[in-house]
Image (cartoon, grey):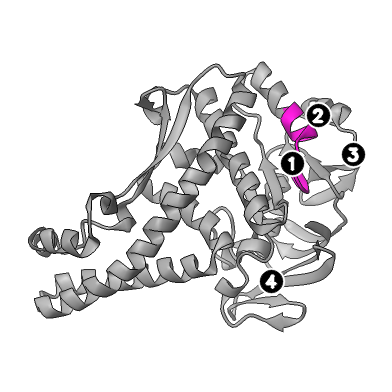
Amino acid sequence: MQLKHLSVVSFKNIRQLELEPAAKLTCLVGSNGEGKTNLLDAIYLLSMCKSSVGLTDRQCIYHGEGFFLLKGSYDVLGKEEVVSCGAAKADGKVMKRNGKAYEKFADHIGLLPLVMISPADSALISDSGEERRRYLNRILSQLDRGYLHAITRYNALLQQRNKALKANSSYDLIEVLDMQLTECARQVYDSRLQLVAQIQERFQKYYSLISEDKEQVSIGYDSDLEQGDFVELLKQSYDKDRALQYTSRGVHRDNLKMKIGDYPIRKIGSQGQQKTMLLALKLAQVDLLKQRMGIAPILLLDDIFDKLDLQRVQNLIHLVSVGNFGQIFLTDSNKVRVDTLLQEVSYEYKLFEVKGGEFAQL
């Protein structure tokens, strides 16, 4: 898959832009705050229907304007796909595929597979399990429309159950909700468990390549559903849930375990080791999406070299430059480092300097 042309109007600090990326590697260099990440966010939004940094649609509109408009022309397995997204302060957001508006944004997820690596990924290690569950959800939502439906329904039922617990509703109502929750929870659990197993080997391979096999790392999956039938678990925790007024067990409390040796990497891993783990995890995701979907996802690399020692930077540059990846967009504030990368690549690339939301090809 390839993004052939990108049009941006009034998005964040980008007033207007028409960009033709390179087929393989597009590099964006410039100081922080000039608009490099904003361009990646525009590409991300066209795939995932929302900003990668959690901004609302209104917050993405260029200051003083009333709307933004993004439009991308893609080659997907030899077929042209034109996707647009428009949002106005006065109205809602509209996503279109080949001129036809989507009724549900969920119907678009998975058409344009994408993986983004950015400084915000540090939350996968430092923050609560909620961030790691979101990570699993983002991958599976691109791979499996059924999973997206299951997790959406699970979350809606969970809200109903919590509301019923707070209202001191009858056990009969809670029991009906428990049966419905269980059906969705089993699908979510099975999909997540399979996903982590599929990522594990790929993850260890990339970590070894970047670190030169200096540390032993692993990932695993932790869930209440490992302990038995979910209906029974909910029955056992009913009195506790009634007192707490929320559901204390379920896949909404699952976690992705990340270890270096036998210990959680968030406790003993250096910043470089944690960054290496995140990079390996995302590159493993690229591999898996490519295998499962038959399409190499677009890879967005935003400021990925920070906190890595020189050797790991060199290993990563080599991996990105010679690896079997699809179309890549890379940002960096260090032009010398980007020039070093470009000296190694033997395929087509383009280099842009970014300043104040303006993009000049070098």
Which picture quadrant has residue 355?
A: top right
- Of tags 4 and 2, which is closer to the observer? 2
Residue labelled with disc 3: 347
- Residue at image location 62% in from the left, 55% down from the top: 292
Q: Earlier in the sequence, mark 4 or mark 2?
A: 4
Query: Which amino acid type corresponds to the residue marked 1 in the rendered image?
Result: Leu
Mark 4 is surrounded, within 10 Å at the Cα level, by few (under 14), some (14 to 19) or many (20 or more) other residues, namely many
Mark 1 is surrounded, within 10 Å at the Cα level, by few (under 14), some (14 to 19) or many (20 or more) other residues, namely many
Q: Could you say whether the residue bearing mark 1 is in a helix, strand or loop?
A: strand
Say the numbered circle drawn on residue 85.
4
Q: 92 or 319: which is nearer to us?
A: 319
CB atoms of marks 3 and 2 within 8 Å: no
Q: 114 or 37: which is nearer to us?
A: 114
Q: Earlier in the sequence, mark 1 or mark 2?
A: 1
Q: Could you say whether the residue bearing mark 2 is in a helix, strand or loop?
A: helix
How far apart in space, not on screen, are marks 4 and 3 (Cα)?
31 Å
How far apart in space, not on screen, are marks 4 and 2 (Cα)?
33 Å
Please provide percent x and percent y for residue 29. 78, 38
Residue 89 higher or lower than 336, as above or below: below
The magenta-colored residue range is 317-329
Q: Is residue 30 left or right of residue 118?
A: right
Q: Could you say whether the residue bearing mark 3 is in a helix, strand or loop?
A: loop
- Residue at image location 67% in from the left, 66% down from the top: 111
How far apart in space, not on screen, are marks 3 and 2 (Cα)?
12 Å
Which picture quadrant has residue 92?
A: bottom right
**Quadrant showing the C terminus:** top right
Query: Which amino acid type corresponds to the residue marked 2 in the rendered image?
Result: Leu
Residue labelled with disc 2: 341
Q: Could you say whether the residue bearing mark 4 is in a helix, strand or loop?
A: strand
Query: Which amino acid type corresponds to the residue marked 3 in the rendered image?
Result: Tyr
